[in-house]
Image (spheres, coloured by chain):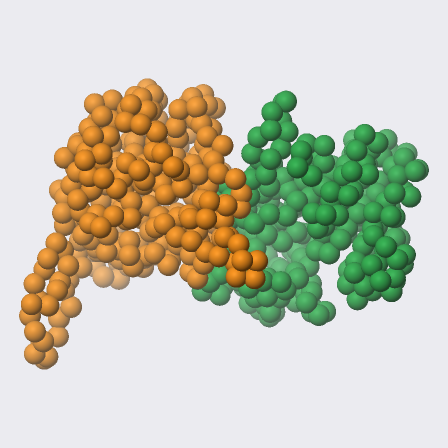
């Protein structure tokens, strides 16, 4: 990991979402990893924001993120203009496993909200590795679906569930997952709201290895401030682990609170 | 022009005045992934106690304008594990390592100091009597001059290493606790720890951090810290190490002009891990620009504001501050 100033090459907006492309020295990353991003906006907000990696292009020295304008920091990232600079620290954290299951079995990826970008990156990497990928995306409405083109581009067909039935199935993304579990996938990977992760973890318990990526308020993102700790089972005990360093990807079974 | 960046803090020689502040740089190894720790004047480890601590439940942090409130609660791996697992990896770092430590009683403070005495790579000890986020220990010792004296004296007996005392600003008169620490045998004073603070989410009608109160750090507290450093440096003969919202070279220079012999960079590391090196470079350039051959000449060099053309009422200085007659 390094921390450096990167140039905004592009920032393409669609409603509250922006696909941010940064250019500079890019260290190869893995799906699930993130960067701390902070524009040069003075002293408030003081901290960078942890943003998952959506993809990278090493040949063009570019790295891409999907930012949703929610609070002060993410609104400022959403508003960045090409040519501006960003303090970018990363790649940070661990990543989703890329092997370790029966290669004959497909894996199921479950994404919701801003949990979709890291899953899109994972879908791309797994497809490149020749793994069978089933992608389930849940959203409130058709308008809230993310990165469908990007996912299809990797050769993966997104399965969709929306709360109002405006696209795909009407219902929750876990409905899609339930059906896929009948075919005994090799592993399940999930990123999204905590309620979604909890439902996914419960469905997978005792049946299939399940990995979830957690979100947490972070100070530094690289392991020194100890702000983002969560309770994790380790060698028969429950201990504090840093979401930014030991995570953000954890085995669902290791999270007693999920 | 070559600038001598080396500074002395008591008997310790630092290759430059820029250090990393305790609680913001882990056990330094994490920072070593960003740059060579040997480039720094020194670094202060996360506060250690015997047996370690799990710290406070999350949420532990929230942002405020120009600052942040934290309530980590001194989570640490313990002196024993630090000495066993981390210290061997830090031995070849050519920089001054300061071990921050605490206990829950005078006896525990002294026992911690004694345990750390054995490790040769620890250059100095920084006694934390100022953490606002633990019920016993920490700030409970730092607000009463008598206790400050007692716990400093007890640790003084327990170690031969230089003993720094990290003070809290959460007192009526910080010079009283500063003098008590000096009288107890401190070799230097680290000024300051965080200010007790609170923030509430009005939409959720909930405190933003689990322990309600936490410690405020960052640029928001810088002017308060500059004043504390100045007052303390005038009140004691031992050196003062300046801490509190330092994020730029100008901040670091300001603390030295106020009276700090060296500075510690803390919260600024979170948003820019390279901040210490950028600060160091900026300080050197400042010295060249202003003709200082020795960075130590900046210490306490702030002058009174003068306007000879203006007939202002004269002022007197009371405990380091100017007030109108």
Query: Seen in the image, is B33 located left or right of residue B173?
Result: right
| Residue A118 seen anywhere in this rendered image of the structure | no
Of residues B158 and A23, the one nearer the viewer is B158
Task: Identify the image quadrant of the N terminus of chain A.
Answer: top right
Task: Specify the colour of chain B.
Answer: orange
Task: Specify the colour of chain A.
Answer: green
Q: Residue at x 17, y 38 (%)?
A: B180
Of residues B202 and B309, the one nearer the viewer is B202
Q: Residue at x 88, y 39 (%)?
A: A181
Query: Seen in the image, is B111 located left or right of residue B269?
Result: left
- Give the answer, above or below, for where B154 lies relative to B210: above
Q: Position of residue B214 (x, y in %)?
A: 42, 47
Q: Residue at x 49, y 65 (%)?
A: A41
| Residue A24 seen anywhere in this rendered image of the structure | yes
- Give the answer, above or below, for where A110 lies relative to B77: below
Q: Position of residue B169 (x, y in %)?
A: 28, 49
Q: Position of residue B246 (x, y in %)?
A: 35, 53
Task: Indicate the quadrant where residue A49 lies.
Answer: bottom right
- Give the answer, above or below, for where A141 lies relative to B36: below
Q: Position of residue B254 (x, y in %)?
A: 26, 57
Query: Seen in the image, is A161 located left or right of residue B302?
Result: right
Task: Identify the image quadrant of the C terminus of chain A.
Answer: top right
Q: Residue at x 78, y 42 (%)?
A: A200
Of residues A52 and B297, the one nearer the viewer is A52
């Amino acid at each position: 990991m390094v921390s450096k100033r990167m140039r905004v090459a592009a920032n393409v907006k669609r409603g509250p979402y922006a696909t941010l492309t940064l250019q500079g020295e890019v260290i190869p990353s893995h799906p699930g990893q993130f960067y701390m991003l902070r524009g040069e906006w003075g002293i408030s907000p003081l901290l960078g924001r942890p943003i998952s990696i959506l993809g990278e292009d090493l040949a063009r020295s570019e790295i891409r993120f999907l930012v949703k304008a929610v609070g002060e920091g993410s609104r400022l990232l959403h508003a960045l203009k090409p040519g501006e600079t960003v303090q970018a620290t990363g790649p940070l954290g661990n990543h989703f496993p890329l092997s370790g299951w029966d290669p004959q079995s497909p894996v199921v990826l479950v994404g919701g909200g801003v949990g979709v970008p890291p899953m899109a990156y994972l879908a791309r990497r797994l497809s490149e590795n020749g793994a069978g990928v089933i992608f389930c995306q849940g959203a409130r409405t058709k308008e809230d679906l993310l990165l469908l083109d990007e996912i299809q581009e990797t050769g993966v067909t997104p399965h969709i569930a929306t709360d109002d039935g405006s696209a795909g199935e009407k219902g929750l993304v876990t409905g899609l997952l339930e059906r896929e579990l009948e075919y005994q996938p090799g592993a399940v990977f999930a990123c999204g709201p905590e309620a979604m992760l909890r439902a996914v973890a419960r469905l997978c318990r005792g049946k299939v290895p399940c990995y979830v990526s957690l979100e947490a308020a972070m100070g530094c993102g690289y392991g020194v401030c100890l702000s983002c700790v969560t309770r994790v089972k380790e060698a028969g005990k429950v201990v504090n682990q840093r979401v930014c360093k030991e995570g953000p990807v954890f085995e669902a079974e290791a999270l007693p609170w999920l | 022009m070559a600038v001598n960046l080396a500074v002395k803090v008591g008997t310790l020689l630092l290759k430059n005045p820029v250090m990393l502040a305790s609680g913001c740089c882990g056990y330094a190894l994490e920072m070593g992934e960003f740059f060579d720790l040997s480039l720094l004047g020194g670094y202060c480890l996360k506060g250690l106690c015997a047996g370690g601590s799990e710290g406070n439940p999350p949420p532990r942090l929230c942002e405020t304008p120009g600052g942040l409130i934290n309530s980590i609660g001194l989570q640490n791996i313990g002196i024993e594990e630090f000495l066993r697992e981390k210290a061997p990896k830090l031995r070849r770092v050519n920089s001054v390592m300061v071990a921050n430590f605490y206990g829950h009683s005078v006896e525990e403070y002294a026992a911690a100091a004694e345990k750390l005495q054995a490790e040769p790579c620890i250059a100095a000890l920084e006694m934390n009597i100022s953490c606002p986020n633990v019920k016993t220990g920490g700030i409970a010792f730092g607000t009463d001059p008598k206790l400050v004296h007692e716990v400093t004296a007890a640790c003084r007996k327990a170690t031969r290493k230089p003993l720094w005392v990290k003070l809290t600003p959460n007192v009526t008169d910080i010079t009283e606790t500063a003098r008590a620490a000096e009288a107890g045998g401190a070799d230097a004073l680290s000024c300051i720890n965080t200010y007790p603070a609170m923030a509430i989410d009005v939409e959720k009608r909930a405190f933003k951090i689990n322990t309600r109160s936490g410690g405020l750090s960052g640029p928001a507290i810088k002017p308060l810290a500059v004043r504390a450093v100045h007052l303390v440096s005038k009140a004691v003969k031992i050196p003062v190490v300046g801490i509190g919202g330092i994020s730029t070279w100008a901040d670091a220079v300001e603390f030295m002009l106020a009276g700090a012999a060296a500075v510690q960079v803390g919260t600024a590391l979170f948003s820019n891990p390279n901040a210490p090196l950028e600060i160091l470079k900026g300080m050197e350039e400042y010295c060249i620009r202003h003709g200082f051959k020795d960075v130590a000449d900046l210490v306490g060099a702030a002058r009174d504001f003068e306007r000879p053309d203006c007939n202002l009422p004269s002022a007197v200085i009371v405990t380091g501050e100017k007030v109108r007659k």
